[in-house]
Structure formats: structure tokens, C-alpha cells
Image (cartoon, grey):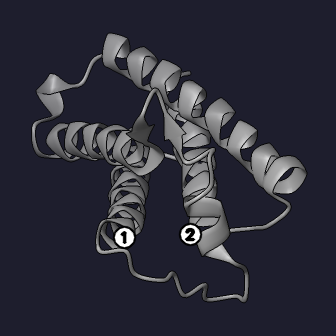
Amino acid sequence: MSDTALQKILAIAALAGFFVARHIWTKKKRDERFLCPIGFDCDTVVRSKFSTLFGVHLEIFGMLYYGAIAVSYFSFLAFPELYSRTVALATLVASAGAFIFSIYLIGIQFFAIKEWCSWCLVSAALCVIIFFSAIALAI
């Protein structure tokens, strides 16, 4: 697959991730009930004691991460001269961290909360796509 195609995948997956995180943040901010598209109890998960890190809601971290990846790769598509091997490795490190954290959060849903959130699972899937695309781009 070409570098440009991988950059498009990264940019689009990150943009989608940003909107998933924003959706969760908006619903929580408005104190609205989550409607899970596949029958899980998203409210239990996104309002659990595990939904913050250092007092910051996880969806804020998600918006920052996904937003940074999306802006970066849309910029690289528009201005290819901005892209470098160093940037590819930095993205790979960031996406590896997000990937590992997503695995941790899936474990929390399974073992601690014993409930699933479809929005959270979509976010985790997008982290997987970004991580493996970043690997392919970096090598």
C-alpha cells in the first residue's frame, strides 16, 4: 500500500475517532443518556469510576490524541514536504500508547465493569487501525 493511502487511512480513522470521543464528551456534558446501537449499557461504562485519568475525562484525552493525529496527517496530505521519518516514528509511539491503553480499557470493561460500551469499542478499533497503519508507514 502506498504511503499516501496509509496517510489517508490514518487521517480518516483519526477524524472518526475524534468524533466518537466528542460524541461521548457531549453526551456526558449534557448529562444525556447514551443510546447504544447494539444493546450494551454505555452509560455504565462511560460514567464509571474508570472514566477519568488524573481527574480528566478520558474522552478529552481521546479528542486530543485523535485530533493531533488527524491534523498531522491531513497536513501531510496537503503538504507532503512536512512529512518525515521522525514524524512517522513519533506517530507510531503515540499510536502504540493509545493502542495499549485501549487494550487496558477493554480489560476494564470485561473484568471490572462487566459491561460493554459500543462507542468505546469503536474507539478501540480505530486505535487498532491507526496503530497498524502507523507501523506500515514507519517501516
Q: Secondary structure at mark 1?
A: helix
Q: Is residue 118 visible?
A: no
Q: Residues within 10 Å of mark 2 (few under 14, many from 20)?
A: many
Residue 99 horizontal/vertical position (percent) = 62, 36
Mark 2 to mark 1 CA distance (whole Å): 9 Å
Q: Check disc 1 and report the residue beneath it.
A: 23
Residue at the spot x=66%, y=68% of the render? 44
**Residue type pointed to by label 2:** Trp
Residue at the spot x=15%, y=40% of the render? 75
Residue at the spot x=36%, y=14% of the render? 85
Q: Residues within 10 Å of mark 1 (few under 14, many from 20)?
A: some
Placement of 91 over or under 25, stated as above or below: above
Q: Check disc 2 and report the residue beneath it.
A: 119
Placement of 75 over or under 86, stated as above or below: below
Residue 59 horizontal/vertical position (percent) = 41, 51
Label 2 with label 1: CB-CB less than 8 Å = yes
Residue reaching furthest to the top: 86
**Residue 64 quadrant:** top left
